[in-house]
Amino acid sequence: MLFFSLFKTLHTCEVKVELKNGLVVNGRIDTVDQYHNIKLTNVTAEDPEKYPHLASVDELFIRGSVLRYISIPPEKVNLELLHESCRRSNPLTKP
């Protein structure tokens, strides 16, 4: 739930997503769910020569199980939210 909370705050944020098959796309987060399924809009492929069929794609639904990385701009990360979520999920910090 930690990352789901973070991704919910990143609605309309530009991100770079790398899939397990090596495909890298840039796009804007439209929706995300608790399984890290992500819908991106304004999608562009990093290597359009290798993936020419993505040139006509504007929206992309990515299943969470095929994600390798999601690169988020550092200024968009809410560190206070992450710290608080980590404290709540850590059994050693609970009274």
Image (cartoon, rainbow, N blue to C red):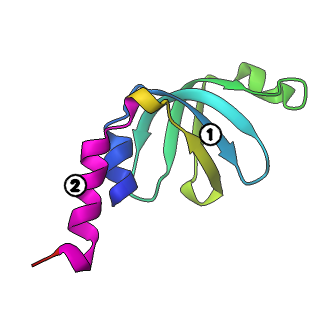
Please tell me which residue is depicted at 23% across the width and 64% down the height of the picture.
87
Callout 1 amino acid: Val
The image shows residue 4, relative to residue 41, as above or below, that is: below
Considering the numbered disc 2 on the image, is that residue within a helix, a strand or a loop? helix
Residue located farthest toward the right when viewing the structure as drawn:
49
In depth, the one of 24 and 62 nearer the eye is 24
The image shows residue 88, relative to residue 20, as above or below, that is: below
Spot occupied by residue 84 in the image (x, y as percentages of width and height):
22, 55
In depth, the one of 19 and 31 nearer the eye is 19
Please tell me which residue is depicted at 31% across the width and 42% down the height of the picture.
79
Callout 2 amino acid: Glu
Residue 84 bears which disc, if any?
A: 2
Instruction: Of the two numbered discs 1 and 2 on the same chain, state the one appearing first in sequence.
Output: 1
The image shows residue 58, relative to residue 74, as above or below, that is: above
Q: Which residue is denoted by mark 1 in the rendering?
A: 17
Q: Residues within 10 Å of mark 2 (few under 14, many from 20)?
A: few
Q: Does the magenta stretch include residue 3?
A: no
Considering the numbered disc 1 on the image, is that residue within a helix, a strand or a loop? strand
The image shows residue 55, relative to residue 36, as above or below, that is: above
In the picture, measured across the screen, residue 69 lies left or right of residue 93, that is: right
Please tell me which residue is depicted at 37% across the width and 34% down the height of the picture.
10
Q: What stretch is highlighted in magenta?
A: 76-93
In the picture, measured across the screen, residue 55 lies left or right of residue 74, that is: right
The chief SS type of the magenta part is: helix
Spot occupied by residue 62 in the image (x, y as percentages of width and height):
59, 46
